[in-house]
Image: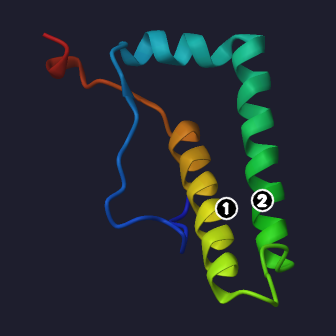
Amino acid sequence: MPDSPLQSPTNREIILNLTPEALAEWKQYETTREVFRWIREWREDLLEQMGRGCFLNLNSVEATALQAAILSGEVQGYDRLLEIKAQEPDAQE
């Protein structure tokens, strides 16, 4: 996934205590694929809302900044979920 302009400089990865094979198997389950599909769709919807300026509050700069920060945080959270990784084999010992 390309770097997002919303990406935090303190990006934290989600690394599960699974082998790469077990993670790959889990990602093939129909339920897992459906959840990941929903996450991708919801993320795209948030980006579209941000692009349309749905977070703007013409009466308050502070409310606008807060809503933009909230939406940005949600997008970053979804990005992290979509990039879940397994531990490196030597790190599992």
* Residue 56 position in % (x across, y down): 79, 81
- Foreground mark, 2 or 1, reads 1
Lateral position of residue 63 relative to residue 44, left or right: left
Residue 71's label in the rendered image is 1
The amino acid sitting under disc 2 is: Leu
Query: Where 62 falls versus 47 (above or below)?
Result: below
Res 6 quadrant in image: bottom right
The tag earlier along the polypeptide, 2 or 1, is: 2
Question: Which residue is pictured at 57% across the width and 49% down the height?
Answer: 79
Res 36 quadrant in image: top right
Q: Quadrant of the N terminus?
A: bottom right
* Residue 15 position in % (x across, y down): 36, 29
Query: Where 14 falls versus 11 (above or below)?
Result: above
The amino acid sitting under disc 1 is: Leu
Query: What residue would you read off at disc 2?
Result: 46
Lateral position of residue 9 relative to residue 26, left or right: left
Q: Quadrant of the C terminus?
A: top left
Question: Which residue is pictured at 37% across the width and 13% down the height?
Answer: 18
Nearer-the-camera pick, 24 or 51: 51
Query: Mark 1 and mark 2 in contact (Cβ < 8 Å)?
Result: yes
* Residue 40 position in % (x across, y down): 74, 44
- Residue density around tag 2, few if under 14, some if 14–19, many if 20 or more, within 10 Å: some
